[in-house]
Structure formats: C-alpha cells, structure tokens
Image (cartoon, rainbow, N blue to C red):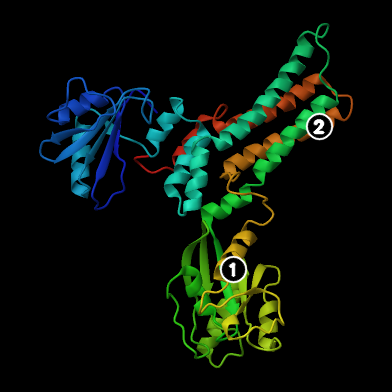
Amino acid sequence: MDLDDTIAAIVTPIGLGGVGILRISGDESTAIADRIISNFPSNPTERYLYNGTIPGTDEILFAVFKSPKSYTGEDVVEINCHGGNAIVKKILAKIIANGARQADPGEFTKRAYLNGKMDLAQAEAVLDLVSASTSRLVDVAFGQLKGVLSEAVDSCRSDLLSILAEIEASLDFSDEVSSPLGQDTKKRISEVLNRIDALLASRKTSVVLRNGATAVILGKPNVGKSSLLNALIGENRAIVTDIPGTTRDVVGETVDLLGIPLRILDTAGIRSAEGKIEQLGIDRARNEAQKADFIIKVLDASEGEPLNEDREILAISPETRSLIVMNKVDLGDNQKMSGIRVSALTGQGVEELKQAINNLLLKDTNLTDGNLLLLASRHEECLLRAKDALGRVLSLLGGTPEPELLAIDLKAAIVSLGEISGVEVSEEVIDRIFAEFCVGK
C-alpha cells in the first residue's frame, strides 16, 4: 500500500437514505476538495462544518481534518450530501477524476493503524463495532476500541520484558548483577500465565456474542411451544391454536436476548405421528435438536405425573445442554418436575427464562460485562503460543536452567503477545485482517 496516495470512498452504506458521506484522505485531500467544491475556502478552519456546492451534483456540507487530528492521521475531507446512490457515486467519480484513487477495503482504518492512531487490536474492534448485531456487543466492542484488550496484553508483555531485561543483564554483567532465576521470577511468570488464562477464558463468550447461538424448543403437541417462541421474541411469529399438531415444520426467528443473538426454532410436537407429514416434522425436530447449541424442553406444569411422551422428550439428545421449562403455570402447578416455571400466555417467568438462557450460554466463563473481551481466533492463537512458551520457562525454572534458554522462550512469548497489538506482526497478517473490512471503513 502506498501511503503517499490520496484515497477516497463512500463511507455510508449503498442505498437510499437521508445522508450520504464520502471521505478523502491523504496529502492532496484539500487540494482535490478545492477543485470540486465551488466555494471551498482558501484556509479552511479545522473541524468546522461548511456549506458548499459541487456543481452538477448536490449542495453539500463538508469538514476538514488536518493531520494528525483525523481518523486516519492524515489530512481528511469529509463530504455530506443527500443519500441517493446516483449522487454519492457521481461525487466519488469527480473526486477520483481530480486526483484520488478508490480506497481499498479497510484502507482508512489500515492507515489509522499504520499512522499510529490505533493499534491492531483496536483496529479489529472497529470491525466488531460496525458489524455488531446487539447492544451488548456494541458495548464490549467499544471498550476494546478504547484499548481494554491492548492494555491487558501490553501489561503482560511489559512484565515479561522486565524479566528478560534482568536475565540479559545477568548474562552481560555476571560479576555485577545477581542471577534472577529464583522463586521470585517463577512467581512473576506464573502471575502472567494466570492473566493470559483469564484472557483466554473470554474466547468462548466472544464466539457466542459474535455468532450467536441456536436453541430448539421441544415438547409434546399442545404444550405451548409456539406460544413460548412468541413470548421470547415478543411477537406473534408462530401460529397458536388449541389443536394438537398445528406445527408441522420448523419455524425460526432470531432475537436479541440480553445482548446475545439467539436463533430460536419451534418444532413439531413429539408424539406417535398421525400421518407422513407429521412424521417428517417430528424427524426434523429431532435433527435440529442434535445440531442446536442447547434445547428448551417444554412440559405442561398443570398436568399430573409426567407422561411417556414427556419422558421421551427428556431423553432426546442428552449430550446437548438443555433447560427444562414447566409451562402453563397459570392453569396450575403440580410441582412434580423441577424446571423453570413460566406461563407463555401471561408472560410469567419469561424474563427468568431469558436470564437462565443467558447463564447457560455463558456458563464456565466467570465473566461479566465489566471484563468481557472479544477475542478473535488470531488473538487466541497468539495467547496460546505465549502460554506454551511460558510453560517451557516454568519447566526450565524447576530444574537448573540455562539463562540463554530462558531468554529464548521469554522472547517467543513476548513476540506472540506483541502480535496482538501489532507491535510485532507480519505484513501478510495485516493484509489478511483488513481484507475483512468493507470499502469505506
């Protein structure tokens, strides 16, 4: 990538809208803007919103950001126009005809990284923020954009650099500096390893927050599965009647459940089928249950002892995580079975069920929103390599270590951690990261 080029792109989504925004970044940005905007000031005030006109296109608002006080760290001009496709494309064509080139995917953020406006982990958080599908993911991604992950990793890396400096000093000045290979060094390495383990613990949660999860509702006919789906998503998505066997196929809907994108599937009632079509629906229900992240097994709380159909449902996919929901508590609750008490009809217990689903998906993470991190697979790989290297250091410290060998493994851990923030990273990795961005970001 040539940082001497001036680049331009449409930074708002393509489509009809009230406003369209274009960005020009590079040394020639103000000169290009001067050539296309009829009343561009000779000495524009930074961060001031001007009225202007681009002849033959639109009346606009524009602002100038001078290096380094801009998103990319370069001179930037941002143009606001009406949001029609034809308008923004015509303005972009004028910008390119006057000396800019079309920006590559993610190139604005890539320049921000290369110009020191953010580190690599923060740049990746930009993509998470843009693609966030829930408010919870927005909150966590914004924290990462502000440097939460970078600070945690840099703290580990800084502590390891201090230990490495002491070891190297003992090698270079053995007569003057005592060897730092005692229990104190072992304790310091162990503390760093504990912090790395804490970071790795958030990977499971990261996958759930980014990709969501799938839940399948199982139960016998007329137990209230469709009503429960409607209650969870807050709208009448599935047909509800008092006729058993109404649902013959899988009905799905995605909902933002306490910040987790959750795909909920309502399925045919499990019983001895009364026809080929119903049997196909039951077979699909069982198949979806095997693929799901967890199962919501619904029983009727108003009935007496669990029936054979109930026992069959409880036995389906025992290896898959599940929640037992006792529905229809508004009609009676015999307390014969343990489970989450709800009434899909009145809404009683639905919020408690949502919280139970949240707890199930985040089980074993010991994380709260205050310490949630969005670990990408790349971050996890770097942390695991650092952990392995530090494990070798501890093994060496358990015997009679050679300082030179300790230094090699310490450096390996330091390099791995540095790859997360981009202190030590190859151009190939950088290109791969920013290739996931859209044009204009």
Q: Residue furthest top?
A: 175
Q: Is residue 402 visible?
A: yes
The amino acid sitting under disc 1 is Leu
Which quadrant: the C terminus? top left
Residue 75 lies, with reference to residue 203, above or below; the image says: above
At label 1, counting other C-alpha atoms closer than 10 Å, the crowd grade (few under 14, some 14-19, many 20 or more) is many
The span from disc 1 to disc 2 (Cα, nearest Å) is: 45 Å
Give the image location of residue 150, x and y in percent: 57, 33
Element marked by disc 2 = helix
The amino acid sitting under disc 2 is Leu
Which quadrant: the N terminus? top left
Give the image location of residue 354, x and y in percent: 56, 65
Q: Which is more N-terminal, label 2 or label 1? A: 1
Question: Which residue bears the numbered disc 1?
Answer: 353
Is 23 placed left or right of 168 in the picture? Answer: left
Is 181 placed left or right of 107 in the picture? Answer: right
Question: Which residue bears the numbered disc 2?
Answer: 394
